[in-house]
Image (cartoon, helix red, strand yellow):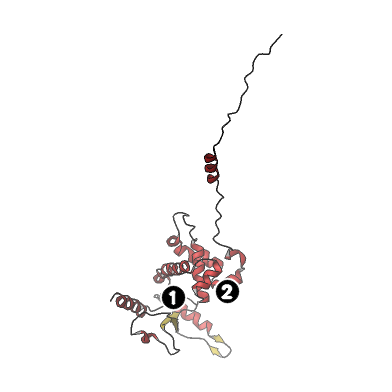
Amino acid sequence: MDFEEPRNVEIPDIHFYSEEEEEEDELQIRLPKKYIRYAQNPFDIWNDIEFKKRFRFSKESIMFGILPLIEEGLAKINNRGLPISPVMQLLICLRFYATTSFQLIVGDVIRISQATISRIIYRVSTLLASNINKYIRMPISEEAKSENQRLFKEIGYGPGAIGFPSINGAIDCTHVRLIRTRLLDIEEIFRNRKGYFSLNVQAIVGPRTEFLDIPTQHMILFVYTELILNVL
């Protein structure tokens, strides 16, 4: 009787898991995290006209004009904690400036907490203010002064008008509301004729609707006095 030669047959290893090992394997199985930060992209959901109504600047002005000035100060070195992008921080701050809405309302619209909104507004405002001396300044050269005078004169032309001759800038003031002064017994100093607390801020603008001067001496004195009294 003939027998076939034995062949090498690979038999897979059989491992019998205990109940403890099966529980450990089940614990290691985790669902992938879902990161949701922005429900909608403002640059996509609004056209140029609607975007400017909400943020007072065009998309190009924000992306290529304002953002490069402060982007480095807002950027994070990594994505730990889902950081808010610099452009979104800028949009949040501009939205607050444009609408003068409460921080809580802004947070509800963009789905960010009120505390985060408050920190973003402070951070972005500080970075924007650090560039004040670069862009807000009166014309010094005679050529710049003559150009402003020429533009102002053209603005004033009209039926029966002769323009605005020899004008370098237009001056006006506005009241910046103070929610709480925290100045102990001298709060009434900042109450205006309309009945609420405010800072009377003066500004000078040029013919291109650009700011030429914003005196800040009294605002610096206000902040300094507030800090001293709080310490005392």
Quadrant into which the N terminus falls: top right
Badge 2 is on which residue? Answer: 53
Looking at the image, residue 71 lies above or below residue 31: below
Residue at 54% x, 42% y is 25
Instruction: Tell me: 21 left or right of 224.
Output: right
Q: Quadrant of residue 157?
A: bottom right
Residue most extreme to the left:
232
Tell me the kind of residue under disc 1.
Ala
Q: Amino acid at mark 2?
A: Lys
Residue where numbered disc 1 is placed: 144
Above or below for 20 versus 140 = above
Circle 1: element type: helix
Q: 137 or 166: which is nearer to us?
A: 137
**First reached walking from the N terminus: tag 2 or tag 1:** 2
Q: Nearer the viewer, mark 2 or mark 1?
A: 2
- Which residue is at 52% across, 71% downward? 106
Q: Position of residue 134 (x, y in %)?
A: 41, 69
Q: Residues within 10 Å of mark 1 (few under 14, many from 20)?
A: few
Q: Please state which of residues 184 and 110 is positioned toward the viewer in this rendering.
A: 184
| Mark 2 element type | helix
- Residue 194: horizontal and vertical position, in percent? 45, 89
